Image (cartoon, rainbow, N blue to C red):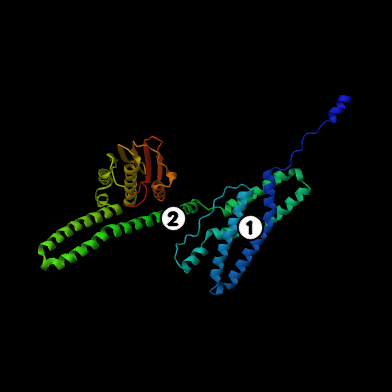
Amino acid sequence: MTSSTSEAAGPLPPPRAPLGPQTWRECGYLLSSWPLDLVAFVYVVTWIWVGALSSLTVIGLPVLALGLVGCRRFGAWERARARSLLKLRIDEPSKLPLRRGAGFLAWLWSSLRDPVGWRTALFFVVRLPWTTITCWLTVVSFFVAWPALPWLARWMTNVDRALVRGLLSPSDELERRIAELESDRAAVTDTASADLRRIERDLHDGAQARLVALAMDLGLAKEKLTEDPQAAARMVDEAHGEVKLALQELRDLARGIHPAILTDRGLGPALSNVAARCAVPVRVTVDLAERPAPAIEGIAYFTASELLQNVSKHSGARHAQVDVWRADDRLMLQVTDDGHGGADLTAGSGLAGLAERLDSVDGVLAITSPAGGPTTVNAELPWRDRRKGTSR
């Protein structure tokens, strides 16, 4: 009996928390949703009321457009709350598809047609009655139905998750694709600006400077024509040589923009021409029964050209190989070398720019370059019909 009594009087097991961290976060979401939704609901109703009253004046449409911009802000805050408290994976929708410098009317029309803003306004109008119920039900459950609160909170926040996904997430794959294209467009714009600056620098430092010197030499030759014909003839001969050099520089520059051989004969001869100028012996194999779209063909050409420049400058290779072929609706490009390896997309080199350029047309760049080599770079581009511009 004594033993039984001592066992009964022994230490109790440590208490366990009735609510886990996720339940506390869900309760916090439920309690904070009602006041926030009330503010957003008042904003939406006031905005629509003011917009309707002013619709007969010139400020009516701008008021509606600005109200939709505000709805987008409310939607961004709600998505952030859902990600933080409900651990809901949800993407941000795309920005307004408005080009820079398009003007006030273009901004107005684009804002009024914004589906994200309108869905957000609908979200706060629809959800206020629900959050009014769930907020007070959560408060009552703390005092009346404490053991059932975890299940109740999970059920109520599941409804919120469905509403957020249905009305505040990107509506379809098109919106997500627009968001991706916005970042790709920025990368392509930066690349184009860098190319224009390079062309301007090459013209200024190369052909333009040579042509200015040529004009000065011809002017001096003209002055000496009557006084010293032999000296004038020598100066004209020198000017003739300068003209040849200037023409060669202009040809090289034009080849860097878009080589005529690529337009006339395709990737095979164009890449063979690039390989012939490479400091490393290069073998080129192009297995294409037909040609891809000009834009894809140009990107493949400049990708291979830049990769071969990297082989010449940085790899220390003795041999390189370029292979081009078609796989279903993709154009495949592979450049390999037997150099010392170590090429890295994340090292801030030109390879990162190449990857961005390919990504802008749904292409992929993959690099395998262990220390000691060899290096293999695979580029994959969409195959698009030259006549229709679509994949086949």
State which tag comes first along the sequence, 2 or 1: 1
Q: Is residue 153 left or right of residue 98?
A: right
Helix, strand or loop at label 1? It is: helix
Q: Judge whether 368 appears above or below 262 on screen.
A: above
Q: Label 1 belongs to which residue?
A: 126
Q: Is residue 158 left or right of residue 143?
A: left
The percent coordinates of residue 47 (x first, y second) are 61, 67
Q: Which residue, as the protein is rendered here, is positioned at the far bottom?
A: 57
Number of other residues with Cα within 10 Å of mark 1, as a class: few under 14, some 14 to 19, many 20 or more: some
Number of other residues with Cα within 10 Å of mark 2, as a class: few under 14, some 14 to 19, many 20 or more: few
Q: Which quadrant of the figure has residue 335?
A: top left
- Identify the residue at image location x=69%, y=45%: 23
Badge nearest the viewer, 2 or 1: 2
Q: In terms of depth relative to the viewer, which is nearer, 234 or 350?
A: 234
The percent coordinates of residue 113 (x first, y second) are 51, 62
The percent coordinates of residue 280 (x first, y second) are 28, 40
Helix, strand or loop at label 2? It is: helix
Q: Which quadrant of the figure has residue 364?
A: top left
Q: In terms of depth relative to the viewer, which is nearer, 39 or 218?
A: 218
Q: Is residue 262 left or right of residue 90?
A: left
Which amino acid type corresponds to the residue marked 2 in the rendered image? Ala
Q: Label 2, label 1: how many angstroms apart (C-alpha)? A: 37 Å
Q: Which residue, as the protein is rendered here, is positioned at the far right?
A: 1
Q: Quadrant of the N terminus?
A: top right
Q: Are marks 2 and 1 in contact (CB under 8 Å)?
A: no
Which amino acid type corresponds to the residue marked 1 in the rendered image? Val
Q: Label 2 belongs to which residue?
A: 186
Whether residue 161 can be seen here: no
The percent coordinates of residue 172 (x first, y second) are 51, 52
